Structure formats: structure tokens, C-alpha cells
Amino acid sequence: MASIAHFQRSAWTTLLALGSVAFTTHSQAQDSSANWPTKAIKVTVPYTPGGSTDIVSRTVFDAVSKRLGQPVIIENKPGANSTIGVAQTARAPADGYHFVSMLAAYTVNMSLYKKLPYKASDFVAVSHVADLPMFLFAANKLPVKNAKELAEYGKKHPLNYASSGTGASAHMIGARWAQENGLNAQHVPYNGSAPILADLMSGQVDMLFDPALVPMPHAKSGKIKVLAVASKQRWPGEPDIPTMEEAGFPGFVMNSWVGVLAPKGTPQPIVDKLSSAIAEAAQSPEVKTKLTQLGFGAVGSTPAQFQQLIDQDTAMYKGVIDKAQVSID
């Protein structure tokens, strides 16, 4: 009997000790989330410096840093249509100090690549940071004055449209517009904005869907045409440019965006705290004004709202890609 009693006491002591460890670990996790951040935060931008994602990220996270009281380090990790930088974040510790800021190309890549070095389930959504309205630009050589005339012209004559690469947002938007309007349009992938604009201005390429930042000054100087914007509403920075819907294409709303993801397992309180800080920063007058001037739309969403956008765009782009029969091995 003494032996049995001793065993019962030992088992009870062990259970108490395990419970104490579990409680301590849980308390430490809660304390860690409550005190976050206590050091610099790293945000990977899977594109080159000076691009849309980089500019939006640096603008917004500079304001986020001031609100959180810790530096935010932006690390550019370009390559393979953003998949290198995204994969790096998927493998990063889920400790609340590693994030990735990226374009809607993330949702395109889910269907574009037969094999990716990560899965959608490797991430949790943090925030839809900003919209990148996509404007339709055209070469001056084309005898058209608006988007409707361009579509009619494209039904009778072969056209080509440029993008920064296979699977880029400009490629997908151009492909969808061509599909829905029965255009004889060929995609021409480029490596960077400079050669695209040179060929658009010279008439070597016919049209381009792109954010305003780089092409718009050339449109204002008369070197190319700007015909419409694929937003739900007219862009505040360019109120005279009609939307694609106003131009005669109902339901054609297809912008790119910048958003932030975290590695799966990042504590939800940290995700929520960063999401709130991003929204507050993006909607602050100084940041919102700066983004508008650059051709971007400040957003700042909840994680759930951003996840809904990701799911919606992933499905939409899959349809475009399947119809265009585009893939990258």
C-alpha cells in the first residue's frame, strides 16, 4: 500500500510540475505578445528598390516604426517573380519579427507556377496596405481616343501589350481584357519599366496596363495616351481619367495591391497589433497624401479583410491563367 501511495504522490507532483511549466510558457507567450515589439522588425520586399512595392512599403513602414517605437528594416530580395523573397519569409521564424510585403502577384503565382517553394497555408494575412490602380496606356500611333475605340480597333487589327514579365499584374489584366473583348492581342514580357516605356513611346508596343507612377508623366507630356483606369472609382489624383466601367466595360475592376503577410504560427495578438498600426499609418494624412501623389491608394485593413481579398484574387487569376494557358514550370 505504501508503494502505491508513494506512486500516486509522485504522479500528482509530476502533473503539478507539468501544469506549472505549461502555465509559465503560456504566460510568457502572452507577455511576449503584449510587449511586442522589443527589437527591430524585418520586412522583406521581394522586388528591387524603387519599385511600387518598395516605395509603398518604405513610406508606410516608416510611419509604422514611429508608432511601434522600434525600427522596421526593409530588405529587398528580388527574383523569380517575387517567389524567392516570399519563400524566405515562409521559412523565417514565426516570432513576430519577420514579414513580407508584396504585390497581388502573390495570388497570380499560386496558379502560374506548377511548383512553388511555399504554400498559401505557410502564411497568415496581416493587412491590405495599399491599392495600385492600373491605368490603360496606349501608343500615340494608334488611331484611338478612348478605351472603347481601342477595343474596337483590336478586334480588327493585331495588338500587343507589355508587362514586366510573365505573370505580372499587367500581364494578367491585359490578358483578361483581351479575353473578355475578343481581341487579337499578344503579350510581350519585358525586364523593367524603362524598356517598356521606350517601346511604347516609339510605337513598338501598343498598350500597357500599369500604375501611374512611371508612365503618367509621359502621358501628361503627350508622348503616350492614357485612356482609363481599372478602379471602381476615378483616381483622386487624376479625376479626368474615366474608369474602365465608365469607358464601356462593366465589371472590369482589376487593380494590383500591396499587402503584408506573416509566417504561419505568428501569434495572433502580434498580427492584430501590426495590422492596426499599418491601418493607422496608412490612413494618417501625411502618408495618405504622399501615396495619392505617387499614384497609390492607402488602405490598411484587418487580417480577415485581407485574407478575403487574397482568396478572391487567387480564384479570379486562376480563371484568367487557365483560359490563357499560361504556366511556369
Image (cartoon, rainbow, N blue to C red):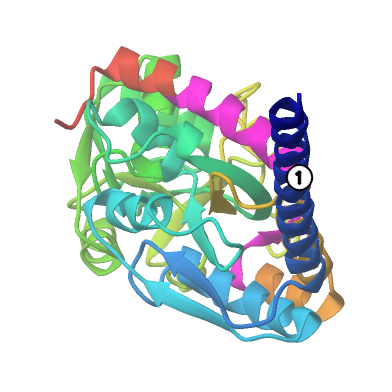
Region in magenta:
294-317
Which image quadrant: the C terminus? top left
Seen in the picture, residue 105 relative to 155 is either above or below; the reply is: below
Residue 298 is one of the magenta-drawn residues: yes
Q: Residues within 10 Å of mark 1 (few under 14, many from 20)?
A: few
Residue 159 appears left or right of 2 = left
Residue placed most toward the observer, 132 or 70: 70
* Residue 105 at x, y percent in the picture: 42, 43
Q: Is residue 75 left or right of residue 202?
A: right
Quadrant into which the N terminus falls: top right
* Label 1: which secondary element: helix
Looking at the image, the residue that sits furthest to the front is 1
Q: Residue 21: horizontal and vertical position, in percent?
A: 71, 53
Q: Nearer the viewer, residue 151 or 310?
A: 310
| Residue toward you, 189 or 270 | 270
Give the vertical position of 145 relative to 241 (above or below): above
Residue drawn at (49%, 59%) of the image: 100
Dominant SS of magenta comes to helix
What's the residue at 80%, 80% (across, down)? Answer: 67
Q: Which residue is mark 1?
A: 13
